[in-house]
Image: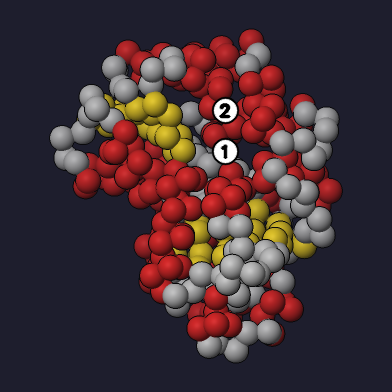
Amino acid sequence: MQDTNEKHSGSSRDISSLPIGVFDSGVGGLTVAREIANKLPHESISYFGDTLRCPYGPRPLTEVRTFARQISAWLTEQRIKLLVIGCNSATAAGLETVQRELDVPVIGVIEPGARAAVKATAARRVGVIGTVATIDSGAYTKAIRSLDAGITVFSSATPRFVEMVEEGLRLDHNPFEDIMAQASAIYIRPAFQEIARDYLNPLKRCQIDTLVLGCTHFPLLTPLISSIIGSEIGIISSAEETARDVAETLARRGQAAPDNSNPIYRFATTASDLGEFSALGSMVFGRPIKDAQRVSIEQLEKALQDKEN
Ligand code: DGL
């Protein structure tokens, strides 16, 4: 990612050609990167997946906050014009801290998801599912109720859904296949349906009309979730709304990539198996991932130390 850096000296035209940084604990945030790439086809993206330390969900928020600060420091060292925290757990743990620390705008996935849910609910009864870190933080309830205090929010941690998504990706043997198009075939199977029923039936009984997928892994489970919870319940993934926020922020700052620019997608990860990261990531991103760069935890720690000094 270094070469992108050197080309830019800081004028607003130079800034507009810098990439958008996106990170997650692994490949889940590629559901967000994919929406950004679809909505903003001229924008370059530098994606970071912290696969070695995935999952973030069961970890204490203070630890996840440190990871978010390290990755943000590393990505800004490579030069980015805007950062998207493409992980709900990291958004819940570190959005405000990272916003205070960086010179570029930082967008999380919780506020956009909350906004989409508030727009969608007629009954004003919203369900939220996510990792333990996200649900225990209360960030969704706070974000939804700050927009409409009359909405009742029912939240539930569904940690096994993250494992299921990862397991399903490994079941698919065609590495460049688009997983979104195959999600019904891959995830609607008896063992997964049983877990989904246990998690979702209590929420269904709460008479929600809208369910927020509060984890960037979960859009892959949309067909499975919908088959259990019922097609009348609206399912919200924050990816689309987040991509809209990115577009608006860049337009407002006059930093959108020129219409004639070809996007460059770069990938970096802490994963020990770069081949597996690229194969699974390609399925989620919907485009082949080549030449992913390996970054060690020591490099991430150093990036944060350098930023602090
Ligand atoms: N993709 C992460 C999120 O949105 C969840 C996966 C994890 O637990 O690391 O919260």
Q: Quadrant of residue 261?
A: bottom right
**Residue 255 showing in the rendered view:** yes
What's under tag 1, amino acid-wise?
His
Q: Position of residue 225 (x, y in %)?
A: 51, 21
Residue displayed at 39% across by 43% down: 113
**Disc 2 element:** helix
Q: Position of residue 190 (x, y in %)?
A: 64, 10
* Residue 217: mark in rendering: 1
Q: Is residue 109 above or below residue 4?
A: above
Residue displayed at 65% across by 14% down: 189
Q: Is residue 159 above or below residue 278?
A: above
* Residue 221: mark in rendering: 2
Mark 1 C-beta to ligand 1 under 8 Å: yes
Q: Quadrant of residue 164?
A: top right
**Residue 309 showing in the rendered view:** no
Q: Position of residue 67 (x, y in %)?
A: 55, 59
Cβ–Cβ below 8 Å for labels 2 and 1? yes
Q: Quadrant of residue 173?
A: top right
* Left or right relative to 180: residue 208: left
Q: Residues within 10 Å of mark 1 (few under 14, many from 20)?
A: many
Q: Is residue 270 above or below residue 201?
A: below
Mark 2 C-beta to ligand 1 under 8 Å: no
Q: Position of residue 215 (x, y in %)?
A: 49, 39
**Disc 1 element:** loop
Q: Could you tell me how far apart the alpha carbons at marks 2 and 1 are, in whole angstroms?
A: 8 Å
* Left or right relative to 290: residue 27: left
Residue displayed at 39% across by 26% down: 234
What's under tag 2, amino acid-wise?
Leu
